C-alpha cells in the first residue's frame, strides 16, 4: 500500500505505547485524523507540555511539575511511615485505595544487575538520606512481588535494619508476579491491612 510517509510515522509513534501494536496504532491515528482533529491537537499539546514540564520530585522521585510534589508538601500526611514503590503508577494505585496516609519514595524500577540497574540508578542514596534525616518509624516495602521486586525489597530491608527502622512488606492479596498498578483498590487495601 502506498501510504503517506507522515501517516506511517504517526502510526509508528503510537506504537511506543505499551500494548499498542500495528492495528491499534492505525486505528488511533486514523481516528484522530478523520474524526477528532481537535482531540488530536489537545493530545499533542498536553503531551508536549507534560514532557517539557513534568520531572521527578526532588524528595520522593514521583512525577510532578513542581520541585517537590503535593504528597511531600502535604501537612496531612503521616510522617512516621515511608512506603517504597517501584513506579509512579504504584503511588497512584495506593492513593486510589485511600488506605495509606504516609510518605512515599519511588524507585522508578527495581534492582537488576543484568540490566545494569543498581542502587545508584534507583536513587537509593537519596532514600538512605531520608531514612537517616526524617525519623521514620516504619519502612513499608511495596515493591512488586516479582523476583527483581523481592531482591529489591531484601536490599531495602537490610538498609533499614541497619538504621533500626521497623520494616514491613505488603502481604496477602497481591498475586505472585503481579504488578501494583493493575490491582484493584480493595485487594490493595487488604494487602496494606495485612502487611507483616
Image (cartoon, grey):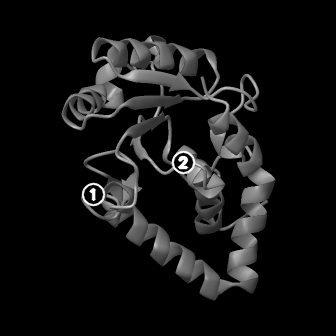
The answer to whether 166 is drawn above or below residue 5 in the figure is above
Label 2 belongs to which residue?
Answer: 100
Q: Residue at 54% across / 29% down in the picture?
A: 143
Looking at the rendering, which quadrant does residue 176 occupy? top right
Q: Is residue 127 left or right of residue 89?
A: left
Q: Which residue ends up furthest to the bottom in the rendered image?
A: 38
- Separation (CA) of disc 2 from disc 1: 19 Å
Q: Quadrant of residue 158?
A: top left
Q: Residue at x 63, y 37 (%)?
A: 192
User: Mark 1, residues whose alpha carbon is within 10 Å: few (<14), some, or many (≥20)?
Assistant: some
Reading the chain from its start, which is encountered first: label 2 or label 1?
A: 1
- Residue 74 screen position, x and y as percent: 35, 62
Q: Residue at x 19, y 34 (%)?
A: 133
Residue 124 locus on image (x, y percent): 31, 26
Say which mark, if any, is on residue 68. 1
Say what secondary structure mark 2 lies in: loop
Amino acid at each position: 500500500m502506498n501510504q503517506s510517509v507522515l501517516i506511517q510515522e504517526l502510526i509508528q509513534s503510537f506504537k511506543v505505547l505499551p500494548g499498542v501494536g500495528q492495528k491499534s496504532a492505525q486505528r488511533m491515528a486514523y481516528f484522530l485524523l478523520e474524526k477528532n482533529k481537535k482531540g488530536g491537537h489537545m493530545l499533542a499539546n498536553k503531551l508536549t507540555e507534560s514532557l517539557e514540564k513534568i520531572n521527578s520530585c526532588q524528595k520522593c522521585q514521583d512525577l510532578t511539575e513542581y520541585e517537590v510534589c503535593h504528597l511531600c508538601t502535604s501537612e496531612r500526611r503521616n510522617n512516621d511511615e515511608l512506603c517504597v514503590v517501584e513506579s509512579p503508577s504504584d503511588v497512584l494505585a495506593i492513593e486510589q485505595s485511600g488506605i495509606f496516609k504516609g510518605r512515599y519514595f519511588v524507585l522508578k524500577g527495581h534492582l537488576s544487575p543484568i540490566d545494569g540497574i543498581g542502587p545508584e540508578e534507583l536513587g537509593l542514596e537519596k532514600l538512605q538520606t531520608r531514612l537517616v534525616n526524617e525519623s521514620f518509624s516504619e519502612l513499608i516495602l511495596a515493591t512488586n512481588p516479582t523476583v527483581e521486586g523481592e531482591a529489591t525489597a531484601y536490599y531495602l530491608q537490610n538498609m533499614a535494619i541497619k538504621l533500626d527502622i521497623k520494616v514491613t512488606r505488603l502481604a496477602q492479596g497481591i498475586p505472585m508476579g503481579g504488578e501494583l498498578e493493575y490491582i484493584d483498590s480493595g485487594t490493595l487495601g487488604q494487602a496494606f491491612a495485612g502487611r507483616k
